[in-house]
Image (tube, rainbow, N blue to C red):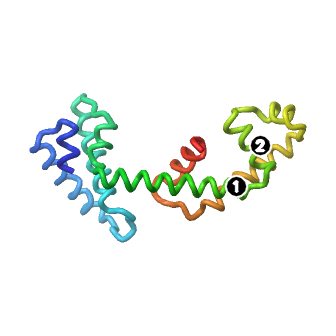
Amino acid sequence: MFKIGLNAGASPELIKDLINQIFLGFIEKNIDWSQIRDARHYIAASFRNKLSDHARSEGKSVPVMELEMADNSIEEKIILTEEEVRLKAQIHQAWQKLPPRCQMVIKLKYFEGLSHEQIAVQTGLSSRSIYNNLSEGLKAMRLLLADLHGPHARHRLLLMFYLF
């Protein structure tokens, strides 16, 4: 946390004060640490939020990128990269299991940005068939990827799905 604060330009005294405040906040909120999947990242995120709140109250801004980058060591960046590769592979496998018509309709809708009417013209499918295929395909993807969970899993899935 100290490194995060220093990289954001905070003084050592302010950093110590904010660290004390977040831990006092944890005590006051009676945090159930057994429910927190990764305590280290939870604490770091709490500190980043506290630092950002303090900067805003002072009329300053702290670039989010500086706060994010300050917390990740080389090892963590490698782990995150490996996790992204694994996630992308799982999404690809789930995609391959979809029926071809679902793949086609999802691709046209989300990757090419076509409306239902444009998809109907291009494929000859009825509007109801397009809706059903979209719904079926997205539901299948969610079920196939249900084991991917965590605090930001839905956002990562959406991001990876669009980047896929």
Residue 15 on image: x %, y %: 15, 46
Q: How many marks?
A: 2
Q: Which residue is mark 2?
A: 105
Res 52 quadrant in image: top left
| Residue at point 20%, 43% (across, down) | 5
Res 25 quadrant in image: bottom left
| Residue at point 30%, 45% (across, down) | 49
Q: CA distance from mark 1 to mark 2?
A: 14 Å
How busy is the neighbourhood of tag 2: few (under 14 within 10 Å), some, or many (20 plus)?
many
Q: Which residue is mark 1?
A: 96
108 is higher (above) or lower (below) than 15: above
Residue 68 on image: x %, y %: 32, 43
In the image as oriented, which residue stretches furthest toward the top?
59
Task: Give the side of residue 148 with respect to residue 96, left or right.
Answer: left
| Residue at point 54%, 44% (across, down) | 159
Q: Amino acid at mark 2?
A: Val
| Residue at point 18%, 52% (across, down) | 19
